[in-house]
Image: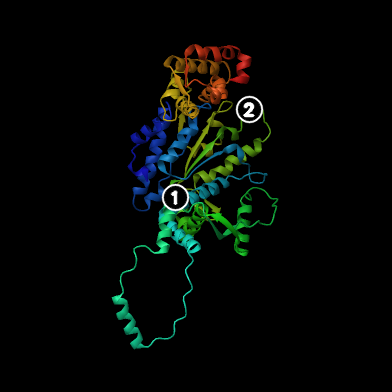
Amino acid sequence: MTLKSLTPKEIVTELNKYIIGQDNAKKFVAIALRNRWRRQQVEGHLQEEISPKNIIMIGPTGVGKTEIARRLARLAQSPFLKIEASKFTEVGYVGRDVESMVRDLTNLAVNMVRSEERRKVDKRAAFLAEDRILDLLVPPGPKPAAPPKSADTKALESSVEALKPAKPALSTREKFRQMLKDGKLDHKEVEMDVSQNMSMPMVEVFSNAGMEDMGSGLKDVFGKMFPQKSKRKKVQVSEALRLLTMEEAEKLIDEDKVIQDAIRRTEQSGIIFLDEIDKITSRHDGAHQGGEVSREGVQRDLLPIVEGSNVNTKFGMVKTDHILFIASGAFHLCKPSDLIPELQGRFPIRVELDSLGEKEFYRILTEPENALIKQYIALMATEGIKLIFDDESIHEIAKIGAKVNQKTDNIGARRLHTMLERLLEDLSFNAPDMKESEFKVTASYVREQLDNIASDEDLSRFIL
């Protein structure tokens, strides 16, 4: 895994390629990720005693909370699940229960491990698929029944075989194999059995939380009861090769090993990102609103999951003791201390993310590998138009973005998405019909397109 070779400094360097600022948050998540590797190197019973230091990130929307967790999961090659805490309801209410996030994480891990195993057997599966295609294209002839042979006859035949000249370099089958590899047979049609997905009986389950994956369980049961049907149809060789390669790969994969590895990976390196955790806080100011009871109930249900418990999934029991939880919230109308004390204790590390201003907006537009400016340049290049932003125009976009965020709701870097769409609206619409091969965005063009909207506070609330 990449994680083994990355130090905290290297992790921060990787995060800097996509996320601007928020150095404290990057530092803490890098330490948390490295600590997981360190724990796995500890020998003896102490390894099980070391628990992950869960993190709660506090900051307004659009400052990079979700992006930090998402990029971190890619670096660690870990099962990663992002889910909104507001989706959960207390046990006894209709809705999703908190254990469903562990089941979802396990499903992701199984798919991840299965994909890795499929890549390992791809070459073998492709060769076996080729053989099956060749059986369809060049059917082997029937072998005549041979009469019983005496010992003298066998000895004579073996001596004759030794005197025979060598076989030709390529048989008909091998010639077809070479043509198949060269793609010369791709458009030829073959008749083969194609498996069909069976339609399962409709079963509705009216119950409280914990039943959301009942449907997949029923499909597994019915799938074992009724064999999968197949239909004979004509398909092109290229499509037949793809279908047969997938079929052969499934046969070569050890499903028990996949599930075992997936559960281990979920337990040892899984990451759950709990977004909008501030939406399940209860404010004790006497002004109770709808759903207050359910909010505290969700927090109480989260406690055992975050602390460590066994969750039943369709693949088996999963322990949550070493899953890393990263929570985030804006906390505009409440504060982290409004969470119940027990849950606060489960998130020992708190990081406050900084708001973004004009300087950060400029860097966001230019520095990251996936910077918005680079994205729009690539999009316009598909229409044969070279899109150019001069430095002054980028500064102007950043300035107007920061100004609109101050005057209206602060939505962080997401403001830049709406502004650039508005700025390049005419160009995006007319690009296919334009004769010019170059379009330059200047500071004056930016002011012309955005100044009127930005200066009108009421209008900017609707448009920007």
In this view, the mark in front (1 or 2): 1
Q: Which residue in the structure is indicated by mark 2?
A: 285
Q: Identify which residue, 77 or 241, lies in the foreground.
A: 241
Q: Callout 2, which amino acid?
A: Asp
Residue 169 pos. (x, y %): 34, 63
Point out residue 76 in the picture as x, y percentages from the top left corner: 41, 42
- What residue is rendered at 51% in x and 51% in y? 187
415 over 155 or under it: above or below? above
Q: Position of residue 459 (x, y in %)?
A: 63, 16
Is 30 on the left or on the right of 382, as rendered? Answer: left
Question: Nearest the camera: 283 or 178?
Answer: 178
Q: Which mark is residue 265?
A: 1
Tell me the distance, in whole angstroms, between the alpha carbons under discs 1 and 2: 43 Å
Is any part of residue 270 visible from this angle? yes
Q: Is residue 138 above or below residue 53?
A: below
Residue type at mark 1 is Arg
Whichever of callouts 1 and 2 sits on the residue coming sooner in the sequence is: 1
Q: Is residue 388 above or below residue 257?
A: above
User: What is the secondary structure assignment of the residue under circle 2?
Assistant: loop
How is the protein colored in the picture?
Answer: rainbow
What x and y, as percent, mark residue 183? 45, 51
